[in-house]
Amino acid sequence: MTDLRTQIEQIIESEPVALFMKGTPAFAACGNSQRALSALRGAGAPVTAVDILPNPHFRQELSALSGWPTIPQIFVKGELIGGADIIEELAASGELERKLAEALGPEYRNGRDERVVELEAA
Amino acid sequence: MAASDTARATIRDMTTATTPLRELLAEAFPDATELEVQDRTGGGDHFQVIVSSPRFAGLSLVEQHRLVYAALERPLADGTIHELRISTKGP
């Protein structure tokens, strides 16, 4: 099995928009994860959600990798965009849509539906 | 304990919860033009911080928030801060 660090790196590098959150889009287990998800949905982002709750190592490894201590964390094309506060701020100013169009192309909304990927503990 | 004593004690606890965070931020941002720490829920572990500083000039929001996280590294690591909302403003 691929080790945890590599799994996380692969998701960050290969998914257009990766949202590491507590819970899933169907049932966010934390208000901040819900805030981030709503902001991304509002901008029409093709979200790939990853639940970090099933195993405490998921969050530890993610934060060690990103140097960002809190959840949620949002990456666009491999770049950390921020947590819930930043995403909300960018969404409110219209900057989020501009960023997504710049990173993913102007047709990013037509990309594909929301998806969920799961990490596997080693 | 009388009801008024309980109320006083609660107010004191709320103040003490934000004080150490305010001190850490004041140390990290001595030139801050605005520095606010709010205990969002009154429970002493969900905080909103607002920092305005010339140090944020030219930095992305991610870089600005990283500076705030760095200032609050200890209370974030030891669990004092369960949830943190950050609002930063440049000059």
Image (spheres, coloured by chain):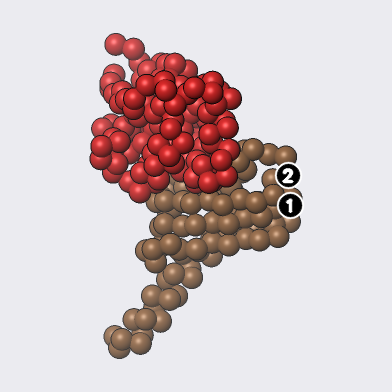
Chain colours: A red, B brown
Please name the amino acid that badge 1 sits on: Pro
The answer to whether any part of residue B18 appears in the image is: yes
> Taking B72 as reference, is A3 above or below it?
above
The residue beneath circle 2 is B57
Q: Residues within 10 Å of mark 2 (few under 14, many from 20)?
A: few
Q: Are marks 2 and 1 on the same chain?
A: yes
| 3D distance between C-alphas at marks 2 and 1 | 6 Å
Q: What is the chain identity of the residue bearing mark 1?
A: B
User: What amino acid type should be assigned to the residue bearing mark 2?
Assistant: Ala
- Judge whether B89 appears above or below A46 on screen: below
B7 or A105, nearer to the observer: A105
Residue placed most toward the observer, B38 or B15: B38
How far across and down, in percent of the image, does residue B46 sit?
A: 41, 57
Taking the view exactly as shown, the residue that stands out farthest to the top is A1
Query: Would you say residue A18 is visible in this rendering?
Result: no
Residue at the spot 54% in from the left edge and 56% down from the top edge:
B49
- In this orientation, which residue lies closer to the viewer: B78 or B51? B51
The residue tagged 1 is: B91
From the viewer's perspective, is B79 left or right of B68? left
| Mark sitting on residue A30 | none
- Pointer 2 with pointer 1, Cβ within 8 A: yes
Which quadrant of the view contains residue A51? top left
Q: Secondary structure at mark 1?
A: loop
